[in-house]
Amino acid sequence: MVLFTETTRRPDRLRAMIAVDTARTKPGARGAMTGARYIESLRDGREVYIDGRRVEDVTVHPAFKDMIAELARCYDLQNSPPYRDEMTFIEPESGVRTSLSWLLPRSAADLKLKRRNSELWNEFTWGQLGRSPDILAPYIISALHLKDAFSAVKHPRCDFGENLANYYRYCLENDIFLTHALGDPQVDRSTQPQNQQREIPEDEQVALHVVEETADGVIVTGGKQLSTAATHAHDCYVALSATFAMRNDPRCVLAFSIPLASPGLKILAREPVSRWFGSWGHPLQMLDEQDCMLFFDRVLVPWDRLFMLYDATPMVKMLGAGGGSVNFNFLGWANLCRAYTRMQLITAVATMVAEAIGVIEYREVASKLGEMVTYCELWRHAMDGVEHEAGPTPSGQWSLGPGRGLHIWFAQTSGRMTELLREICGSGIIMQPSENDLANPEIRAYLDKYMRGKGVGVDYKSRLFRLAHDLAASSFGMRQDIYEYWHGGDPARNRINLLRSYDQSAMRGRIEELLSRPLAHGTTS
Ligand SMILES: Cc1cc2nc3c(=O)[nH]c(=O)nc-3n(C[C@H](O)[C@H](O)[C@H](O)COP(=O)(O)OP(=O)(O)OC[C@H]3O[C@@H](n4cnc5c(N)ncnc54)[C@H](O)[C@@H]3O)c2cc1C
């Protein structure tokens, strides 16, 4: 039976991919995640702790249930008629309909499909999720691009490149939600020089390392700081960041992916942000995606889930950590679309606030709003630029053009945008009545009189300012700012890595030539 026949709009290759016979559907492949399946999948016995207590079921715990419900809603949306064709596709080899986040792009048209999918994920979640299910899929896809480099590291028990390829298929066919954990715990940074080969052995008490090889896999012990969404993702991709790639002790050189419910893996969730009573206390509070410490206590990593062991060469290459250039776009559309949605949201809220209190005509305020629009526009042009520079990689994937400079720029600009929003709001960002204040007849008349805005009532104004508060003044907003600054790794380190791989030879050559000869039109006296 033909599942779906596409009409005129789509590229030929996709049309071919979509008309698939259900008889060919691979047994066990479950395809695009649904809300109900997602919630059920999290009842897996994972060992989560918060505020000193073990959590029995993350799907009903007050600290996590809203985020989980929100993602379940998004998963249902990706399967719903209005979005199904923009967020899922039928994968020819397995015959299952699955998420476009997992499509391995092989053409400019594929990249366009992926862009739209990422735009929708971010539209649904207001550009607030650094770890939506769409975000980590590009990591595995990007690593696959270097499959041969991973295979080149030999181990008698497995082929690391093949493991990556098989794991990718598992994620693709089952729409797995990944998070990742790269850094060492923040115990003592004095022994980890940035961008340099580490000379002192890692602290065995702290850094994640292999303690034993067994017939089933390696046993690992140690900590990771940190892993966003570990409370509600399925698997964790554990590897090294550019800072930690050049290890001293080979036992600390590891990359693998395992379920977050793996025995021995303990997950410590931080205090929730922006919790408040009332139905519209914090409009974005359902998007608290949590950040967690991971403690591995003799956790088994099966041989078929290991991607790198004892030799970091492929990871150093993948991350450009050795100063080499990275000719593929590591993060793909997911992060670019997220940043764009976030910038547009902050700019629109600032504009609406300026209108609501009658300051939009002031030159200083309008100029600040114009600065915000400038950033939105720059980002849009940059997105078009990396799309324009997209092309095939040696492995046959299509990659967006290089985007390392973009991510560094956003790490420094995101905070500027929330600063501008705070400046435009004035004290109103904190001085608003609550929902219960508004319902109280004894003070309501005062609120109507003294807390309304220019042409808007107090209800609208307080809700609008609460959104601004969520973005730029609340614990949620501060966490988002901190996330944007740090999530791609230390911006200073990233700038240094970019500098070291940046080709300046043409301009340097011209300068050297200029300095080597008398000026053509220079004066002599
Ligand atoms: C909200 C949030 C979510 C995150 N989510 C994830 C995630 O899901 N997965 C993941 O793997 N990581 C995640 N991270 C971690 C992120 O990658 C790190 O925060 C980042 O790499 C910086 O490391 P650090 O926090 O340990 O800071 P540190 O490295 O401890 O830095 C602290 C300070 O010391 C300076 N410093 C440190 N070392 C040196 C040095 N050698 N030379 C000079 N200065 C130095 C830094 O510049 C900084 O000012 C997240 C971080 C945040 C804040």
Image (cartoon, rainbow, N blue to C red):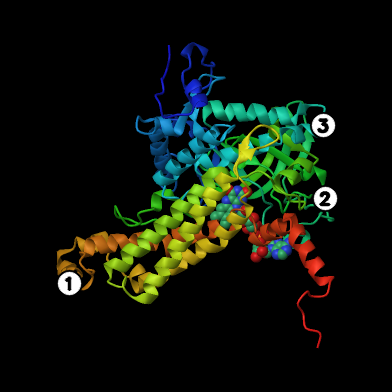
Given contact means CB atoms under 8 Å apart, are the residues at marks 2 and 3 in contact? Answer: no
According to the image, label 1 marks what residue?
Answer: 449
Assign ligand 1 to one image quadrant: bottom right
Q: CA distance from mark 2 to mark 3?
A: 19 Å
Q: Residue at x 51, y 40 (%)?
A: 134
Q: Residue at x 36, y 68 (%)?
A: 429
Above or below for 473 versus 272: below
According to the image, label 2 marks what residue?
Answer: 248
Q: CA distance from mark 1 to mark 3?
A: 75 Å
Task: Tell which of 411 and 20 is nearer to you.
Answer: 20
Q: Quadrant location of residue 216?
A: top right
Task: Tell which of 200 and 333 is nearer to you.
Answer: 333
Element class at badge 3:
strand
| N-terminal-most mark, 2 or 1 | 2
Residue 259 visible in the snapshot: yes
Above or below for 373 versus 233: below
Given contact means CB atoms under 8 Å apart, are the residues at marks 1 and 3 in contact? Answer: no
Residue 123, position as x, y percentages in the image? 41, 46
Q: Residue at x 15, y 64 (%)?
A: 441
Q: Amino acid at mark 2?
A: Asn
According to the image, label 3 marks what residue?
Answer: 154
Q: Is residue 331 left or right of residue 189?
A: left
Task: Classify the position of the N terminus by image quarter.
Answer: top left
Q: CA distance from mark 2 to mark 1?
A: 67 Å
Count of numbered badges drawn on the protein? 3
Element class at badge 1:
helix
Element class at badge 2:
loop
Q: Amino acid at mark 3?
A: Lys
